[in-house]
Image (tube, rainbow, N blue to C red):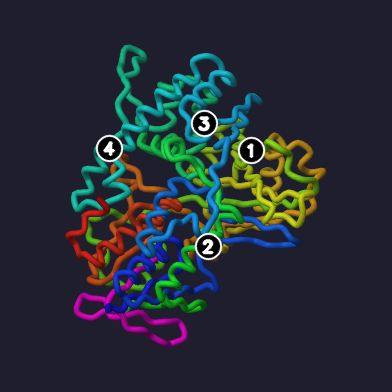
Amino acid sequence: MARTAVIGAGMGAMAAAARLAVAGHRVTVYERTETYGGALRRVERDGFAFDTGPALLPLPAVYRDLFVKTGKEPLEDRVELVQVDPAARHVFADGTEVALPNASRAGVVTALDEALGAGAGQRWGDFLVRAREAWDRSRRPLLEEPLWPNWSVLAEREPYPAVPHRRLLRTRRAATPAEIGAFELRDPRLAALLEGHALAYGLDPRTAPASAAVLPYMEHAFGVWYVRGGLRELARAVYERCLERRVEFVFGAEVTRIAAADGRVTGVEFADGGSAEAEFVVAGVPPETLDRLVAGAPVRGAGEVPPQRGLPSRLTVLLALRGGRPAGTAHRTVVHCADREAELQALFGPAPRMPERPTVTVTRPDDPALVPDPEHEAVTLTATVPALPGDAADGDALGAHADRLITAAERAVPGLRDRLLWHEVRTPSDVAEATGAPGGAVPAPALAAAGGRLLHPANSTGLAGLFTVGGWSHPGGGLPHAGMSGALVAGLIVEGPEFRGSQ
């Protein structure tokens, strides 16, 4: 039985821990905070409860596989999954609204035609067909297999199919989501629909590769799901599965060094001066933290994928409302800003700042477990914001931006301010505290093309016995991707370098 130390109790780290324990490893998870789940946290106050991380689960098959492989037990025996319908309601800048059915191409086409005019649905449907082609081309190497040694093939090859567009006597092909919107969708509201998916993952649709089309496709093809009681319940279920497989958790344990000798890990050392021996170390930490822990050891070679840096964060506003949730309310509403270009320039320009008019996601779960009684409603507002180092986090500026989110949300929740009992703001600093990421940066999913700029480092490293897991390593950020990274790391440790992913 190999001794394995896991640094961090995020979702990817716990997924790896459970799988390794089933394979016979003695696994101990060392978490610097006092709880598990990484970004999947919960705030409770006055009988209200709120998720402060992801609000919906795409691709639940990843966690279904985890539970079957670590106990031959369905995920649904541990949590109640609810497929939300509609998948999302969208409020566009011109006041147009549309509710898109969950995982129904015909329903989406009809809804868009009725809301935006004849032909809009067909253009979006045709786009989804091309997005499926991109998904089929990139799914295995980006999600189900360890990162290829010849990863430059993924960096150079754009999986989104070329659609020639003739303009000014020249033929052009869409290279970014923004260009897909302009050349292929040809409606500012459809363009906003696509760009909103990229922005939600912290990507600039003007510079992200066209392969970002897989993000809306993933939701369309596999649906989006809610976990009754909040997504924190998924973290609880995975944590409990780890305990059942005799994974040991040590909370409040800050790892300060990964010990090594003769080019191989030997264990970990802690802030209190203690240490623990280990044949394998799985690090679920941001790249800056990993660099500090290895103290100059050769973890990444010159020809390998570099870590992503400079990614944005998120601002979350928790609203306690008087009055119950109206019947027929959409679980998720995206309120699109009036000036997308100004928003993108603020977020991704040379001096990132809070946009004056943000795109806001309004989450309104139909869940009695989140409110003190049926006469109240728990609502969460989320927006992409710049990552802010601790010394740059201006409380007044963040408070003012939270007020902008509330103002934008009034377009989706009539009478919102009149119903407001209280609100709390979760800032990039709170994200940093939960995840350890500098400035509260949130990793994006791995995407092909763009010169490899949106790939993530491989799970294996140049230091024998050291592996990385979670959003900052292959296959990147997002709940499904975290679960996949856990499966990849476990496979690489158990089967060795010849492991090629699930079949």
Secondary element type, mark 4: helix
Gap in angstroms between the C-alphas marked 2 and 1: 30 Å
Q: Earlier in the sequence, mark 3 or mark 4?
A: 4
Q: Is residue 122 left or right of residue 496?
A: right
Front-lying residue, 285 or 230: 230
In what element is the residue under mark 1?
A: loop
Q: Amino acid at mark 3?
A: Leu
Mark 2 element type: helix
Check contact, mark 4 vs mark 2: CB within 8 A.
no
**Disc number for residue 193:** 3
User: How far apart are the alpha carbons under marks 4 and 2?
Assistant: 34 Å
Task: First in sequence, mark 2 or 1: give its number.
Answer: 1
Residue 337 location in percent, x, y? 61, 34
Of badges 1 and 3, the one in the foreground is 1
Foreground residue, 225 or 497? Answer: 225
Judge whether residue 282 is colored magenta. yes
**Which residues are drawn in magenta?**
260-284
User: What residue is shown at x 17% (from left), y 59% (from top)?
Assistant: 498
Kind of residue at disc 4: Arg
The residue identified by callout 2 is 432
Residue 368 x %, y %? 69, 52
Residue at the extreme bottom: 273
Q: Which residue is denoted by mark 4 in the rendering?
A: 137
Quadrant placement of the N terminus: bottom left
Numbered circle sitting on residue 330: 1
Distance between the Cα atoms at labels 1 and 3?
A: 16 Å
Gap between marks 3 and 4 measured at Cα: 23 Å
What amino acid is at disc 2? Ala
Upstream in sequence: badge 4 or badge 2? 4
Q: Is residue 273 above or below residue 249?
A: below
Estimate the x, y position of residue 213 in percent, counting from the top left: 40, 35
Contact between marks 2 and 3 (CB within 8 A): the answer is no
